[in-house]
Amino acid sequence: MSARPDALIERAEVGGGHDGQAELIVTLRFASGGRTAVVLDTEAGMRLMRNCGVDDAAALAGHPWNKILEDPTCST
Amino acid sequence: MFDLIIRGGDIIDGTGRPRWRGDVGIRDGRIAAIGQVNGEARRVIDATNRIVAPGFIDPHTHFDVQLLWDGQARPALEHGITTVVPGNCSLSLAPLKAADRPRLVGMFQQIEELPPAAFTEAFVWTWESFAGYRDALAKTVAINVAPLVGHSVIRLWVMGDAAQQRAANADEIAAMQDLLRECLDAGAVGLSTSFVDVDEHLHPVPSRWAAAAELDALAAVLGEYGRMLQVVPEFYATDITIARVDQLAELSLKYDIPTTFSPLFDSRATPDNVPRVMARVDEQFARGARVWPQVQTRPIDISFSFEHPSLFFARFPTWYRVMRMPRAERLAALRDPATADKLVAETGADGGRMMLGGLTIRGGEGAPKALEGRKLGDIADERNTTPARALIDVSLEGDLNVPFLAASLGHEASDRVGPLLAHPHVHVGASDGGAHIQSFATYGDTSYLLGHFVRDTQHLSLEDAVRKITRDTAQIWGISERGTIEEGMAADVVVFDADRIDRGGERAVFDMPGGGMRYVRECIGMDAVVVNGALAYASGAYTDARVGQVCALTGVRS
């Protein structure tokens, strides 16, 4: 795993998930300028917020996407 | 002498042709006459001002275990569902060695939110083979069943613990092929697999450990029978979903099989998801592949309580912090006036009216009965306070275990979902019937289709909507002799009021084995449901008829 962030989080929104739980819809921007969206369930969404040290999904903007891979064992 | 005549209804026969007025005569479980039917009958249903249509087929359910203690799959049957496909998402109750039952129960618990008591307290689990499961079903069902066999259990049978550790070798793949043939010979309508699910230990389910060659080999077996491959793709990412569409298309073309994937959701947050996936689906259909996206009709509701953290509050940092505190600290924070003031202030100058006022208090074990089904905004008005304060107060009064429902947080834009449901390559399904029972009601999607998207928004004609959930579904899956009202077909027939048909409000019931709770929605406007010629539901009540069948199948060739 490269230390270089593959993508930056551009924004994150709250939505409704297939399992009836709220989820986080994260828009990513790659270094190339390309964008994509990834939907995170409760466990993954909370892990991303915790790893980025934020309590507000709006504050995820600008954080590297590969933060999602840090400390995967602790869920919340 | 007929067993039953349904007289004077507007017949929508499932083919899509316009309705016409006539009678339907039923004898020996079959449709015996259509039109002006003369003669005696043991029973007559007056269908004046009613629609008479084929029974509906639900292609994506998890009724695997419920059917063993509730052969009517309540309340699906009262919504007009006369045939269900269980065994989706790589999970089925067979083939499975007795020693692996706890493992499968754990997966069902994690993925489909089915409580363990559902597997242990209401039936005697005597079978290991798929034929044994089929025979057990045949003794109990009042509804027809076309069961899938799950890839995860096939893998578990052949590989044991290694099923969740590594790819299979050539001998193991060959053994899986043989086992799949055995299941298909015993009546499995196809194979289900999953690329996303995890077990209760958050380990990928067995099907996710399969290399592409394994799925290819199993698809080859499906090709011998012309049977279905059902897949749960990585629906959280559009690009990966599109890649799975391409993979399924290659398998469909290579082995001449139908494939289907579910779910496909519309979302305002990812507005290009559906258009991009559907563009690829259309492209693959144009090549001759069959890759049917399943789209559910109902919007997505979400629920939360202060008992567990939820991303619902991910835009409100104080709420989010409080929800993630240890329970005792959480309680103390909510009781602390200064913290409560801060929480209320964070919801805006309107005290959370816009954000929280529309929340509904759900039924359930912790729900205060007097408040069940009521809007938080109304409760706040009664208490002369703000919705945010009412949310805190009601939660504390229920010791945090009060469930709240936020309705229509996804897949809710009728102007987008309606045309999607009408799309010729969209397979109406993905209800998840019988699953997620403690989170939301997975019953009534067909009633919602007919009430909302036909009657209210008129995105589909009633004839087209009925065709999609009857004949089209039967043809997509190769379910023989069902799906249309024609002489000689199995007599699965529904009689409903097109002006009233709808799903009722969600409510909590405690009818699971062991007294467990689930959410249900009853049907509004369904007069009668006939399964294989027997009246299974009429005038708001279920009958004792138990004549459901494990469906006859035909290979689905292009």
Image (cartoon, rainbow, N blue to C red):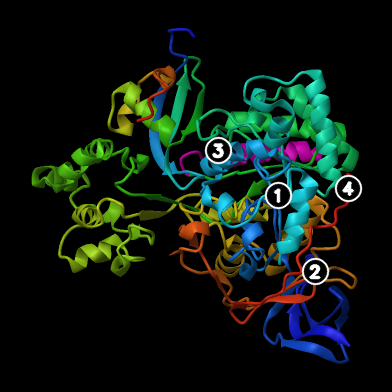
Which circle's residue, 4 or 3, is located before the other in the chain?
3
Which circle's residue, 1 or 4, is located before the other in the chain?
1
Q: Chain of mark 1?
A: B
For numbered disc 4, what is the local secondary structure? loop
How far is disc 3 from disc 1 in space, using C-alphas?
48 Å
Which residue, given by chain and number where applicable, does mark 4 sit on?
B555
The correct choice, above or below, for B531 with respect to B249 in the image is below
Which label was assigned to residue B272?
3
- Viewer-side residue, B3 vs B129: B129
Residue B265 magenta: no
For numbered disc 3, what is the local secondary structure? loop
Kindly identify the amino acid type of the residue bearing the numbered disc 4.
Gly
How far is disc 1 from disc 4 in space, using C-alphas?
30 Å
Specify start and end residues of the magenta stretch as a single range.
Answer: B268-288
- Circles 1 and 4, Cβ within 8 Å, touching? The answer is no
Q: Chain of mark 4?
A: B
